[in-house]
Image (cartoon, rainbow, N blue to C red):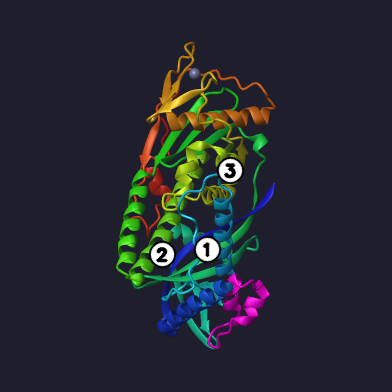
Amino acid sequence: MGKEATKTIQTRLHVASGERSWLHDARLTSREIFNETIHLKQQGYTRTEIQNEVDHDDFLRNNKCAVVGKALQTWDSYQSLKNWWENQDDPDGGKPTPPSTDKTGAYPLVMAHTEGYRLTVDDDTNRVRFRISPKPYKKVKGHLRGEPDAMNELRDAITSDEVDVGQAELLYRNGVYYLHVTVTREFDVPEPDTADTLVGVDINERNVALTALDRETLRTKGTLVLDYGRVKQERQRYHTITKRCQEHGKTSIHQTLGDTEERFTEGVLHRLSRAVVEFAKQFSNPVIVFEDMEGIRDEIKYGSYLNRRLHKLPFHTFETFVSYKATWREIPTDTVDAYYNSKTCSCCCERGYRQGGRFRCTNDECDVVQDHADRNASVNIAWREKAKLDGNTMDYRTHKTQPQVRLVRLSGPGRVNRPTSSRSLAEQGVLAHG
Ligand SMILES: [Zn+2]
């Protein structure tokens, strides 16, 4: 099945000509455009109306439309979060707040390829050259730097007809300008039905549990639990600082931390989703299987947790991240019912219960008695996929013993700005399975 996927390549600017202050100014103007866009959207303006209404002389019209587009995406995700929140049976505190329109400081400059920016590969040096137009008639030029793999991917994208170079975002952190370039191409993703390995993914407030089940032999090929408990603690810390700053009216610090927290969450989701795909791709013909999100909303285990804004890791964003990373590897994804996956014994299919980190089976005849609670749910998801693909209504289980659970802890601080590469994930043992 032909499927398009977009991916972001992260690079750093090496400026050779033009003023760095033009880049800075353009990012400040982007913030004004963001604020104006949200403000107008709240008053019911359409995208076209906003694009006409927002006016900045010293800014490319094309860039303006791109920044408006990014601001509207933020608005849309706020809207869908708010709709979700309002549909909860018993929403506790933490109603989503609309994007703020009075922030100061910079916002990413968003540009379309060949309009606001252009990339070329230098035949002699093999460098990727850039030309950025932060203002009308002003150009900043130089070349891009990045990880060798990422740069090769980018060169391919620029020179190949099969890959589209799309929008880029100009960011700035600790004295360095970054250009995040999106590239899109079409992939040949097999149908889930052709899979030989079923990889069940269970996500909850503590970790992401993965189990790979062989569709033919019904053997568990591996289990991995990615624990992000420390990340949660780190978010809690941000929250505490944020609150203190609010109490003292230090809004500027609050805003800085708010952005850090946002980046932080996104970084964590990227690392987790990359690890899921890396885990899956070591097996033959895998399909990555999630619980249906509609069902997850009804499951009590997520309820109180999800409703707390701070601790909430946006699960649908996580699933989206996994799906597009999987597409890039030509790995299909699928969903199964979330019906009692966390309360069903993965061996005998009877109901059981969770006791701390363990799952306990109540069936006297069952050999399992207890298992790692989160792995248990991920095994159920994989089994459910088998039943779905093979058209089995009988949900029987045969295996009695499960391999040891491999646990990897993700820690928060220090990794925020530098996402872990696939290679280092492998070195840390994320790819190993017990
Ligand atoms: Zn059992």
Near-viewer residue (12 or 264): 264
Q: Report the span colored magenta.
A: 40-67
The reply to whether callout 2 and callout 3 are in contact (CB within 8 Å) is no
Q: Which residue is found at the position 43% from the left and 72% from the top?
A: 13
Q: Which residue is mark 3?
A: 293
Density class for disc 1 (Cα within 10 Å; few <14, some 14-19, many ≥20) is many
The prevailing secondary structure element of the residues shown in magenta is helix
Q: Quadrant of residue 256?
A: bottom left
The three-letter code of the residue at mark 2 reads Asp
Give the spatial CA distance, label 2 vs label 1: 28 Å
Q: Position of residue 116 (x, y in %)?
A: 56, 77
Q: Position of residue 86 (x, y in %)?
A: 57, 52
The three-letter code of the residue at mark 1 reads Leu
- Badge 2 or badge 1: first in the primary sequence: 1
Residue 21 higher or lower than 399, as above or below: below
Give the spatial CA distance, label 1 vs label 3: 34 Å
Which quarter of the figure is the C terminus placed in? top left
Density class for disc 3 (Cα within 10 Å; few <14, some 14-19, many ≥20) is some
Q: Position of residue 83 (x, y in %)?
A: 59, 54
Q: Is residue 22 left or right of residue 339?
A: left
Q: Which residue is mark 1?
A: 154
Q: Quadrant of residue 69?
A: bottom right
Q: Nearer the viewer, mark 2 or mark 1?
A: 2
